[in-house]
Image: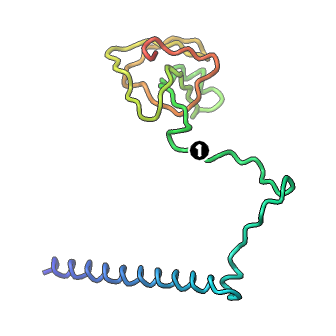
Amino acid sequence: MWHVALVALCVVAAILLAAMLSAVIGMQRSLKKAAARKGSPAAQAVPRVMEDSGPASAAPNVPPAKEMWADSEYCWVVVCKNDSFHRHPNINNVHRIPLGQTDAVETRPEIEMPFSVTCDECRKKYVYQPSEVLRWEMAAPPSFVPHTLFK
């Protein structure tokens, strides 16, 4: 019996939601019509865009919006295991060692056995499992040389 009551409750909720949506759409249409009439308070409240009159009114340099995946640089990285060196200033700090450049959708290269990596900061060499390789959004450092497995 409670199944019937639950279905009825869902139907009533859907009807109320549809009625509220049509009321909102109707209010938006009436506001647009009111704004279209000259001299109405709604028309006066609409902000006007000023014409560009030259260098005095030029907007400040605003960089273009960054598109997801398109403008980002990614690298394959491993986290350095030398915690005592990298976590000294901040206990939550980790150092990511770049191994190779990639993009947002490329799959990880097939690596079947552990491999060694030398950290570019502390110069310690550690062995990493293939599962420890991560994709990280970062620009490769200027002196970056890809790891032999990621060329």
- The outermost residue toward the right is 56
Q: What element carries label 1?
A: loop
Could you say which is closer to the camera, residue 54 or residue 11? 54
Q: How crowded is mark 1: few (under 14 residues within 10 Å), some or many (20 or more)?
A: few
- Residue type at mark 1 is Lys
Residue 99, horizontal then vertical, whole percent: 50, 19
| Picture layout, residue 68 above or below residue 83 | below
Q: Quadrant of residue 41?
A: bottom right
Could you say which is closer to the camera, residue 42 or residue 37? 37
Q: Quadrant of residue 121?
A: top right
Residue 77, horizontal then vertical, whole percent: 49, 25
Count of picture labels: 1
Residue drawn at point x = 50 percent, y = 24 percent = 101
Residue 95, horizontal then vertical, whole percent: 56, 26
Provide the residue designation for mark 1.
66
- The outermost residue toward the left is 1
Residue 90, horizontal then vertical, whole percent: 63, 32
Residue drawn at point x = 51 percent, y = 15 percent = 146
- The outermost residue toward the bottom is 40
Could you say which is closer to the camera, residue 73 or residue 133? 73
Q: In which quarter of the image is the N terminus?
A: bottom left
Please indicate whether residue 65 sits to the left or right of residue 128 in the image. Answer: right
The colour scheme used here is rainbow
Please indicate whether residue 120 sits to the left or right of residue 4 in the image. Answer: right
Residue drawn at point x = 55 percent, y = 29 percent = 94
